[in-house]
Image: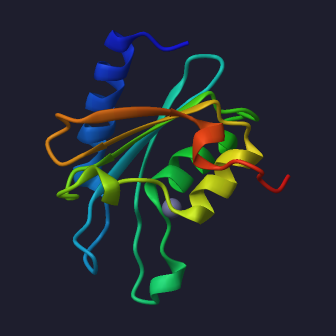
Amino acid sequence: MMMPSDVTRLVGVAREAAPRAYSPYSEFRVGAVAITPDGDEVTGVNVENAAYPSSTCAEATAIATAVAAGARKIDTVVVACIDAVDISGAYPCGRCRQIMAEFDVDSVVVTAGDGSEVRTHTFDELLPYRFG
Ligand SMILES: [Zn+2]
């Protein structure tokens, strides 16, 4: 269970990662942190491609990197869309939600813009009745 101080710090970690996004097409930079049960904090960014469908979201990058390091469960994913003007445009896409389902994510933290608004959701809120 994350404490509010942890949320604030982890939002900062995600926001620090976001400028490293490779997003020349959308100019929409996203940073994410996948937190493992061991407490590892693995960052990811969105990585776009000239062939747009070949692009990868920050959440997917973070989870894949954590899995490559040995994780088989992710407790929390923190997402920071620093270029989103409204938090409603900062939520994980459907593909990322399905990837989160695979690794049994418990909660998702979302923030946009300057990070002043932060929302924490249970994963069930984001993807009920999921395929698995
Ligand atoms: Zn996505």
Residue located 77% across and 51% down the image: 129
Seen in the picture, residue 46 relative to 121 is either above or below; the reply is: below
Residue located 73% across and 41% down the image: 103
Image position, residue 37 (x, y; %): 66, 20
Q: Is residue 71 left or right of residue 31?
A: right
Seen in the picture, residue 51 relative to 48 is either above or below; the reply is: below
Seen in the picture, residue 27 relative to 89 is either above or below; the reply is: below
Q: Quadrant of residue 5?
A: top left
Image position, residue 93 (x, y; %): 51, 62
Residue located 27% across and 53% down the image: 20
Seen in the picture, residue 81 relative to 119 is either above or below; the reply is: below
Image position, residue 65 (x, y; %): 58, 46
Residue located 45% across and 85% down the image: 52
Question: From this viewpoint, is residue 58 visible?
Answer: yes
Tally of marks:
0
Quarter containing the N terminus: top right
- Viewer-proximal residue among 120 and 48: 120
Question: From this viewpoint, is residue 66 visible?
Answer: no
- Viewer-proximal residue among 77 and 24: 77
Image position, residue 87 (x, y; %): 28, 50
Q: Quadrant of residue 27?
A: bottom left
Q: How is the image coloured?
A: rainbow
Pick out the residue farthest to the bottom. Answer: 51
Q: Is residue 91 left or right of residue 5?
A: right
